[in-house]
Structure formats: structure tokens, C-alpha cells
Image (cartoon, rainbow, N blue to C red):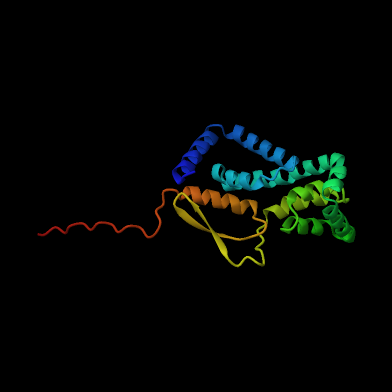
Amino acid sequence: PSKEKIVSLWKCATAYQEANWWWVFFMFESLYLSFKAFAIPVGFALCVLSGAIFPLPVAQALTGFGESIGSTLCYLLASVIAKPLLERIFPERLRALRERAETEKAHWTLFNLFLRLSPVTPNWFINLASPVVGNPISSFFIASLLATQVCVPSPAAAHASTLHVSGISLALPCISPLPRLHLACISRAALDARARPLGPDPPRPRRARLRD
């Protein structure tokens, strides 16, 4: 879609959110919890959306608790039905995670933080496999709440990508994983600057001097 279409949709969504604040609040959080509970990887898009329509502290709280509670719901569902599916579809990956978990039993919280901050293993697989490998739910919840909110620069990311929204350019450091607050800040800053022209401000016209 064009820049004008993006801004128009954002204005419409913001106006609806302001007129129906609590409805949008609860529906957004319910949607976030539902997607996370069923291991549907749409957190990136929802985090950008939260920063566009909510104030940043609210967006941070919504995505933080949505991530931790939704992942815990996925953990509970996976403890009932996921073991035979994972052993059939991802046997090698599950075996590797189980072997690593066996060696880290004395440091469950740190191990869970490592899993969340690592770009190698996707979050949906961690949510499904954690109860199968014996990962305790308390350490799992704490890591889900904290690690997904932390900005950790990737060691290999020395360059930056550019986000173009509404006629502005934002330097976006390449990080892994991209934190929820960072995404919310990007979307809010990009849309708030929709009317800001690129480059320096145009010079103001000089007033004619009156002669005596």
C-alpha cells in the first residue's frame, strides 16, 4: 500500500481506539493471547500495531504480558498434546533440546533466558517443546516475560537497515531478537512523523524593510 493509505488506515485505527478504548484494549490482548497460545508466529506484526495505536507504556505492557501469558498457555496445551507430534515431526531438534536441557538443570532460569535470546531456536518451538523436555513452568514464565523485552544487539549485526514509512527514514539496528518495545517505538515514531518533510526546514521569506 502507498504511504497515504498507511497513514489513512492508522488515523482510522487510532480514532476507533480512542472512541472505544477498553474494547480495543481487551480485544487486542485477547487476540495476542490466542495467537501465542496456539503457537502462531504473528508477534512481530502485533507489536508494530500496538505501537501505532497505543501509547508506548501501554503497548509495552500489552505485548509483554501477552507474550508471557500466551506462551505459558501454549506450554500447558503442549504438555497435553504436543509430545507425539514433536517426536514425529521434529525428532532431531527435540532430541538436541532435550540433551541440552539435561545439562542445564541446575540453571533453568538462565537456560530459558538463553533460549529466548538466541536467534537459532524459534519461540514457537520453545513453547511447544519446553514441557516435553522437562522445562519447569516457573522459569519458563519468567524468561518469557523478561527476555522478549530486552534489546540485545546481534554480534554479527554491524550494519543497519532503513525503515521508510510516511516519507521518513528511520535507522533500524539489526538486532536479534527484535524487542517488543523497539518495534512499538519504531511504529509510533514513523507514523507521528508522517507530515514531517525530509531534509532541512525550508527558509522563511524575508520581510520587506520599511523605509522612513
- Image coords of residue 31 (percent x, y): 67, 37
Q: Which corner quadrant holds the C terminus?
A: bottom left
Left or right relative to 189: residue 50:
right
- Give the residue drawn at x 21%, y 57%: 207
> In the drawing, does residue 55 fall left or right of residue 83?
left
Q: Residue at x 61, y 45 (%)?
A: 45
In-image side of 210 versus 28 (left or right): left
User: Quadrant of residue 208 in the image?
Assistant: bottom left
Residue 66 appears at what percent x and percent y?
70, 43
Give the residue furthest to the front: 88
Tell me where residue 158 sits by quadrant.
bottom right
Q: How many marks?
A: 0
x and y percent of residue 11 in the render?
48, 39
Q: Is residue 32 above or below residue 139?
A: above
Using the image as rendered, state which of residue 48 and residue 63 is in the foreground: 48
The one of 161 and 16 positioned closer to us in this rendering: 161
- At horizontal 62% and vertical 36% (from top left) the residue drawn is 25
Give x and y (percent) for residue 145: 73, 50
